[in-house]
Every structure is written in structure tokens, then in C-alpha cells.
Image (cartoon, helix red, strand yellow):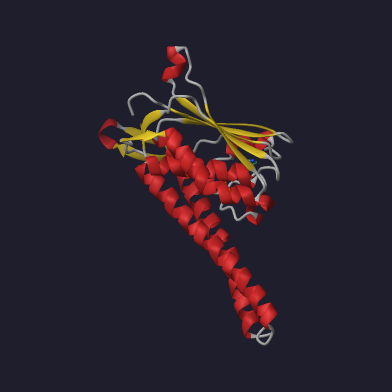
Amino acid sequence: QDTTFQVSARVVPDLNVVLLCFLDITQVQQAGQMRRDFVANVSHELRTPLTALTGFIETLRGAARDDPAARDRFLDIMEGEAGRMNRLVGDLLSLSRVEDEERVRPREKVLIDDILLSVMRTLTPLAQEMEITLRESFSDTPTELVGDGDQLMQVFTNLIENAIKYGRKGGTVEIRIGQPERDPALRAMGVRIHVTDDGPGIDEKHLPRLTERFYRADNHRSRALGGTGLGLAIVKHIINRHRGRLRVESEPGKGSVFTVVLPTGAG
Ligand code: ADP
């Protein structure tokens, strides 16, 4: 990794010396580059549906004007493209909100079991559409922790929705709360929630980059399923805010396990 220095020189006549000041601006430059990349990515992601919309408007004005069947088909596609833009703007707003709130400690008492059940209820129609069985495996005593209920809902919505979307048709997605550890030291590390699918899995080379904004392991599938590429970036910021951890294990051909570890001690 290169290091960039900003160098300035000053002559001190009384002492007959020249002062050279080296300032390490590597991180400032990297932050600037990341910001430029982000803006370029957002512009590109918005331009794709916009170009499609403009093209279809032109076609509706011209060739498809007197063809009701074609008109309906094109309007459906346009609705889909507008939906894609809507999702992207929604995820960008969520990302900026969770980044803003990352330094503020969450204060609510929440029950993880209730959050997971509520997310599973919301995602049942999607699971049915993809012919996937949602299965839960919770421990006997509900798990309480201090957190932000809405944000934790978003974490598990994104993870379970991914497990369904990228899962195997006819397969199973399991949501499991780890049994409390006997060892007090391990128990103090917090509760582990595992979201497991039996889909195609993720190649090892992608794993370290999955939570980067707009990073997609399977670009084609993500776009076909209407993904924005921001879901796991949002997840990462929320988990950071909760001082938790996200672990991803995957075996291509067998499936993936996304594990969230959340501290259950004083929030
Ligand atoms: P997207 O909107 O593309 O789903 P995410 O940030 O939620 O964006 O996920 C990033 C990428 O990680 C996805 O594009 C997909 O390639 C991969 N991915 C996420 N979850 C899974 C999973 N359960 N199985 C396989 N691939 C997954």
C-alpha cells in the first residue's frame, strides 16, 4: 500500500535552517477516492433505469402508440424500472441514516425472538413465491438485549430476504438463535443468531467484500432479483452501532450461514 505525504518547507532565517514538514495524507486521499467511487456508482445505478424509462417513453409515443398489448407490456417494464429506482433511493436514505446514527448508543429493550418472528411473518409471502420453507429454532427462554428495534428488524429482514432470494427453489431457510453458552466468558460475548440457506453459496474470494456498498458476488442474479447492492452495507453499520459482529461462512454448492453476534450485556 502506497503512502502519500504532503510536504511543505519553511526557511527559518534566524537559525539558518530549513524546516521540512511531512504530513501523511494517505487516509484523506483514500476517503476522497471512496467518496468519488460512491458518487460514480450511485450515478451509474440510477442512470440504468432512467435510460430504460426514457427509451420506453419514446417507444410509447412512437411505434407502440396504437398497439395496446405492447403498451401494457412496456408500462409493466417501466413500473419495474421505477420500482428499482425507488428501492435504490430508499436504501441510500437508510444507509445515510444508519451511518449518522452509528455513534449514538441504542437504548431500547428488545426481544430478539419477537423481532425474528415479525420479520419471518413479513417475508412469508416472498418465501412462498420462491417455494422456500422458513424454519425457526429458538431457545426456550426469549433473548432480551438493549438495541434499536427498528434497525434490528432491518438487519434480519435484509439477511433473511437474501437467504430466500439467493436460496434454492424448494429449499429451506433456517433462523436459529444459538443456545446460551455455559461458559460465562463465552456467554458474555452475546447472543448468536444464524440465518442459514441451502442455496448455491458464495465463492470464498467474495466473502471479505460482501458488506462493501454496491459489491455483488453474483451481479446478474442480484440485478435480476431487484437487489440494490446496499443491503449488507446497511447491515454492517447497524451491527457496528450495536457493537456486534457479522460472520459469513459459505460453501459453494451447499449454502451460506450469516451469523450475527449481539452483546446481551449492558447496551
Ligand atoms: P443485493 O441487493 O445485491 O442483494 P446485498 O448487499 O444484500 O446486495 O448482498 C451483496 C451480495 O452478496 C449479493 O449481491 C449476493 O451476490 C451476495 N449474497 C448475499 N446473501 C447471499 C446468500 N444468502 N447466498 C448467496 N449470495 C448472497
Q: State the residue at coordinates (28%, 36%).
A: 13
Image quadrant in which the C terminus is located: top left
Residue 176 location in percent, x, y? 55, 30
Residue found at the very far right of the displayed protein: 253
Q: Is 161 placed left or right of 35 in the picture?
A: right
Observer able to see residue 5:
no
Residue 246 location in percent, x, y? 51, 32
Q: Nearer the viewer, residue 189 or 172?
A: 172
Q: Is residue 59 above or below residue 182?
A: below
Q: State the residue at coordinates (50%, 48%).
A: 122
**Which image quadrant shows ligand 1?**
top right
Residue found at the very far front of the displayed protein: 140
Observer able to see residue 190:
yes
Residue 220 location in percent, x, y? 69, 52
Q: State the residue at coordinates (46%, 54%).
A: 92
Residue found at the very far bottom of the displayed protein: 66
Residue 90 location in percent, x, y? 46, 56
Residue found at the very far top of the displayed protein: 183
Image quadrant in which the N terminus is located: top right
Q: In terms of image quadrants, where is residue 170?
A: top right
